[in-house]
Image (cartoon, grey):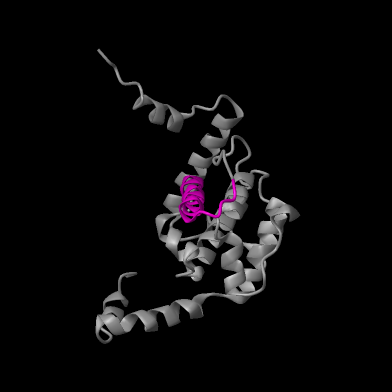
Amino acid sequence: MASQGAPGMANKGPAYGLSREVQGKIDKKYDPELEEKLIQWIVAQCGSGVGRPEPGKTGFQVWLKDGCVLSELINTLYPGDKPIKKIQTSPMAFKQMEQIAQFLNAAERYGVTKTDMFQTVDLWEGKDMAAVQRTLVALGSIAVTKDDGAYRGDPNWFHKKAQENRRDFSDDQLKEGKNVIGLQMGSNKGASQAGMTGSEKTHRG
């Protein structure tokens, strides 16, 4: 059922004329009230050290653009080992995009689905700040649902995820989340590091 409506949108006028219209629709989806709620949460979650953005969509984008605030945010949601080891501000575009990508990878591991995930350019170039809001709302909802003591702020800012239609998916993820937390409390497997170093062990001679 979800796919209905998509073909209708695609048929409106020639493709080259769509970009401005689409951009207009995207801009309308950006919610200034939600922006304020998300800022409150990020500051509550990370502490006042992350500062506050200038009001408005551009201010919000500039605040998050180098990926550092987002990386701090995702790190605070992991009770055990932090997923992002290195957070550093950089004036270089590729470093900022790298930092955003690290946040997105960590958010996906945390349980944010691909459909709720923004793309790096959505934030870095300000192409779709509504998508950035969507990702942050999904992240907050999962944090409230996990209820593992890592969430800070008002739990009513986000809806719990378990009541959605994707019940089977959410339950599996919740179980998976508990297992991951259990592992982190004990010895951390470090599977990702093992995978990375494996390729470096080349045999010579």
Q: Seen from this angle, which residue lies furthest bottom?
A: 13
User: Furthest-right residue in view?
Assistant: 48
Q: Residue at x 47, y 49 (%)?
A: 98
**Left or right: residue 189 compared with residue 55:** left
Residue 18 colored in magenta in the image: no
Which residue is at a point 43% across and 57% down the rendered structure image?
166
Q: Would you place residue 1 above or below residue 111 in this image? A: below
Farthest-out residue, front = 91
**From this viewpoint, is residue 159 visible?**
no
* Residue 172: x %, y % from top left: 45, 45
User: Is residue 102 highlighted in magenta?
Assistant: yes
Quadrant of the rendered image containing residue 115: bottom left
Q: Residue at x 59, y 38 (%)?
A: 82
Classify 203 as above or below 142.
Answer: above
Q: Residue furthest top?
A: 205
Q: Which residue corresponds to the image point at 63% horizontal and 64% vertical from the top-left?
A: 38
Relative to the observer, which residue lies in front, 143 or 198? 198
The part of the chain drawn in magenta is: 88-110
Q: Quadrant of the C terminus?
A: top left
In the image, 121: left or right of 39?
left
Image x and y of residue 67, in percent:
55, 54
Q: Position of residue 23 (x, y in %)?
A: 42, 78
